Amino acid sequence: MLIQFNKYQGTGNDFVLLDNRDNRYDFFTKEQVAFLCNRHFGIGADGLILLNKKEGFDFEMKYFNADGAEGSMCGNGARCIIKFAYNSGIKKNTYRFTACDGEHEAEIDINALVRLKMNDVDKVETYLNHFVVNTGSPHFIKYSGDVTNMDVKASGKSIRYSKEFAEKGINVNFIETVDDDKIYVRTYERGVEDETLSCGTGVTASALVAAHNENGFNHVKVKTQGGNLSVEFDKKDDNHFENIWLIGPATFVFKGEIIIEN
């Protein structure tokens, strides 16, 4: 079957995006998704996203990990699908869409940055002086003194496959404080099973943990391997965060066609 695809990236986190509003791509198997995401034999991406119709909303986002399994929420992927929706004729000031973790809002600001509203967070767990936060996807967060020179793949894999997390899997973030309102984050992602250049839900979780204001409004700048993001939120206390917005670029890379076997 002939597949017509678009490739987008958000701070280096890249995705295959397909317009599935006519349900033409409902048939995908896990193996086919993994093939399309394969960087040697397919298109190459950290994940695949379907733009689906959804009554009462602008669209539905359906996300698959690079291994072909249906994934949890993807913040950078959601920002990319907003740009894709806009370029596909769904032109809005404010978007309302659904993903696996529920309803979301988004907008494209005057600087062409995509602002994505994440779900509220009501729990931050501590684990051996580190943190576990779910921002639509589960994240382990560890402060590290020298993130630049870390072997993120080896260190992240050891935590992701530890006995505590191996069954369900977890994403692993290593963060370093740059200054009072900026952090540097590198992430090992489950489903990709490697470091990605950026992870939106991981950046969000890390920013919540690194809030510079004890309570109230926070704006945290985040450096990733693939570029810069920022996270805005209202901190109620150490376990409750509201009005969380992930902000950053989402860029069209290329489009094309590929044939896969049915």
Image: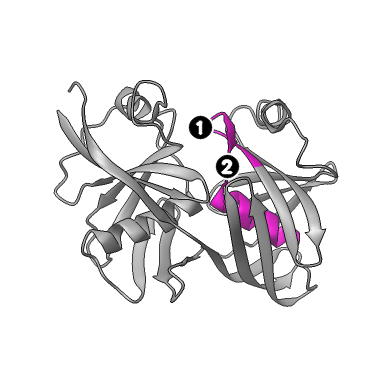
Q: Which residue is mark 2?
A: 197
Q: Amino acid at mark 1?
A: Gly
In the picture, residue 183 is in which quadrant? Answer: bottom right
Tell me: 49 left or right of 258: right
Q: Position of residue 80 (x, y in %)?
A: 40, 54
Tell me the quadrant of the picture where the N terminus can be found: top left
> Foreground residue, 56 or 52?
52
Q: Residues within 10 Å of mark 1 (few under 14, many from 20)?
A: many
Residue at the location (75% across, 67% down)?
A: 181
Of discs 2 and 1, which sits in the foreground? 2
Q: Which residue is mark 1?
A: 191
Question: Where residue 255 is drawn, which disc sits there?
Answer: none
Tell me: 236 left or right of 232: right
Q: Which residues, given as a range, are shown in magenta?
A: 187-210
Q: Position of residue 143 (x, y in %)?
A: 80, 47
Q: Is label 2 in a helix, a strand or a loop?
A: loop
Q: Is residue 197 magenta?
A: yes
Tell me: 193 left or right of 10: right
Residue at the location (22% across, 56% down)?
A: 53
